[in-house]
């Protein structure tokens, strides 16, 4: 059986935690920051959790993990 290819777009955007969950960067922190309050900008800098419903799609995209 041939080797499976990794989806590079998923590999560049996701990180795997030690417990096997996946984290992603939040959208909206690149520009137009003047109208966003400080609390919102702080939250955008933190990683977001990927929902468990998406886990099967991510495992298919990353067959050998990260």
Image (spheres, rainbow, N blue to C red):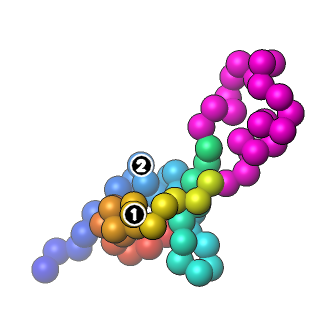
Q: Which residue is mark 1?
A: 53
Label 1, label 2: how far apart the Cα atoms are: 19 Å
Q: Nearer the viewer, mark 1 or mark 2?
A: 1
The x and y percentages for residue 33 are: 76, 23
Let me know if residue 58 is in the magenta part. Answer: no
Q: Is residue 52 left or right of residue 40?
A: left
Q: Which percent across, then down, holds residue 66?
A: 49, 69
Question: Which image quadrant: the N terminus?
Answer: bottom left
Q: Residue at x 54, y 65 (%)?
A: 22
Quarter of the figure with residue 44: top right
- Mark 2, residues whose alpha carbon is within 10 Å: few (<14), some, or many (≥20)? few
Q: Which mark is residue 9?
A: 2
Say left or right for 23 vs 1.
right
The label number, if any, that marks residue 17 in the structure image: none
Rendered position, 24 above or below 2: above
Taking 48 as reference, is 4 above or below it?
A: below
Viewer-nearest residue: 40 or 47: 40
Residue count near mark 1 (Cα–Cα under 10 Å), binned few <14, some 14–19, many ≥20: few
The answer to whether one can see residue 6 in this image is: no
């Amino acid at each position: 059986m041939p080797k499976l290819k990794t989806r590079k777009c998923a590999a560049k955007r996701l990180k795997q935690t030690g417990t096997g969950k996946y984290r992603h960067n939040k959208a909206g922190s690149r520009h137009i920051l003047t109208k966003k309050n400080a609390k919102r900008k702080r939250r955008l800098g933190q990683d977001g959790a990927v929902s468990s419903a998406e886990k099967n799609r991510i495992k298919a995209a990353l067959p050998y993990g990260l």
